[in-house]
Image (cartoon, rainbow, N blue to C red):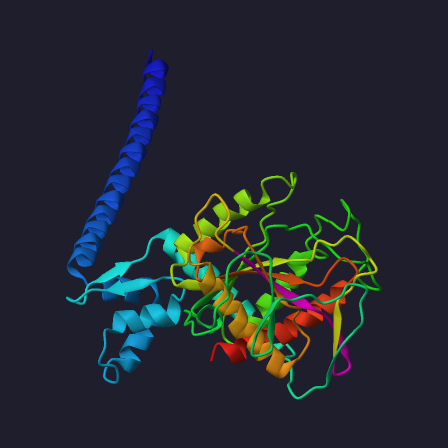
Amino acid sequence: MVNMAVISLKDMIKYLVKITIVISIVIGITRYFSVAKDEIQKQAEHIQSSTLLSCLDTAIPTISAINREQKEEQTHNPVLLALDTQLGMIASLQTEDNTIHLASQEEIIGQAITEKTQKEDQQNAENVTQATTGLKTEVQKTNVPERYSSQYHGVKIRNETQYKLTQEILTPDIKVNKNNILIFHTHTCESYTASGGYEYKQTGNFRTTDKNYSVVRVGRELDKQLTSYGYHVIHNETYHDYPSYTGSYSNSLKTVTKLLAENKNTDIVIDLHRDAIGDTTYAPTVKIGDEYAAQLMFVIGGNGSTIKHETWAQNLKFAVKIQEKANELYPGLFKPIILRYSGYNQHVSKAATIIEVGSTGNTLDQCLNSMKYLAKVMDEALK
């Protein structure tokens, strides 16, 4: 009996020790979280009573350093300076009462994309070889005779309508907004005769879905050249004639309408094509200096489509304005302007036009050369 009592007492002591340990742990944990809670509450009260600048100083020590160093030198809001210096991806708006509105995630991403695009455009512009003037030009012979019915100061026009082209209509007294230049392709898959370094797989008769070898590639070159002169270019590469050629103009109208709604200050709208003559022997070319460039041609639409276009003469004035300057700088770069009844979606703007770059017999490198001279002409004409 005595032995049993001793054993029970020992067990009891062990049990009490365990209880004591558990209680001590619980008390310790409780105190820990109590202190943490108090600290969190103090931090919350500190944050609530602090300005946005203090929060930024706490989160981003670098900003705090900048603010301290430039506090006496800067008279404008230091928060904006800190954001501009350290958080270039954040767009901030300052209201009249100097409160700060941080941009949404979409705005931040949008600004980042814009900045990246602008940087790429600047880099591309720096690598562009611009055209020079004062070069000898010589139009190369073709098997297609030049035809025209009217002239304005040397600008030849092939009028395929019954419109009477008066001096008033042809005088290029048009003023256009140069903020944006829109380039697109109704016949996106149009391509050229393959040449060394420009071989490609055709997906039709002088057609390819490979944009590196189609008229889209020509549009990219014009975009790059115009950008080098400081213009803001919107180049759309959407397929409008693939998988179906039918409905190309309806498709491109949807694209252009949307783009113009997004870029309201846009007058110059260029639908870049290739002449549709499917004959490799026809390659309208002009030699400028030591280079061979594909000839260009304006096609202006009239008021003969289902969509009314009673201001077609404005488009014609724009074409005459550009071609008049081209005749001065590079005679023969342009073939005669063609005026037709079909509207070609040119009702969308007063300076909307089709420009056909070469024909099926021209090579892509000849067409790329043309864009260098076209950009120079446009820059000179739009000054």
Tell me where residue 354 appears, x and y as whole percent. 58, 59
Q: Nearer the viewer, residue 62 or 336?
A: 336
Tell me where residue 228 appears, x and y as whole percent. 56, 75
| Residue 227 visible in rendering | no
Report which quarter residue 95 is drawn in: bottom left
Tell me where residue 155 appears, x and y as whole percent. 59, 74
How many tags in the picture? 0
Report which quarter residue 123 is drawn in: bottom right
Tell me where residue 372 appears, x and y as whole percent. 64, 74
Residue 245 to residue 111: above or below: above
| Residue 48 visible in rendering | yes
Left or right of 83: which side holds 375? right
Q: Residue at x 32, y 16 (%)?
A: 5
Report which quarter residue 52 is drawn in: bottom left
Left or right of 56: which side holds 48? left
Left or right of 8: which side holds 182? right
Give the main secondary structure of the magenta stretch: strand
What is the span of residues highlighted in magenta in the rendered image? 288-301
Residue extending furthest top? 1
Q: Nearer the viewer, residue 134 or 155?
A: 155
Q: Nearer the viewer, residue 366 or 143?
A: 143
Residue 351 to residue 18: above or below: below
Q: Nearer the viewer, residue 281 or 44?
A: 281
- Examine the structure image and report whether residue 300 is included in the region drawn in magenta: yes
Q: Residue at x 69, y 52 (%)?
A: 190
Left or right of 112: which side holds 154? right
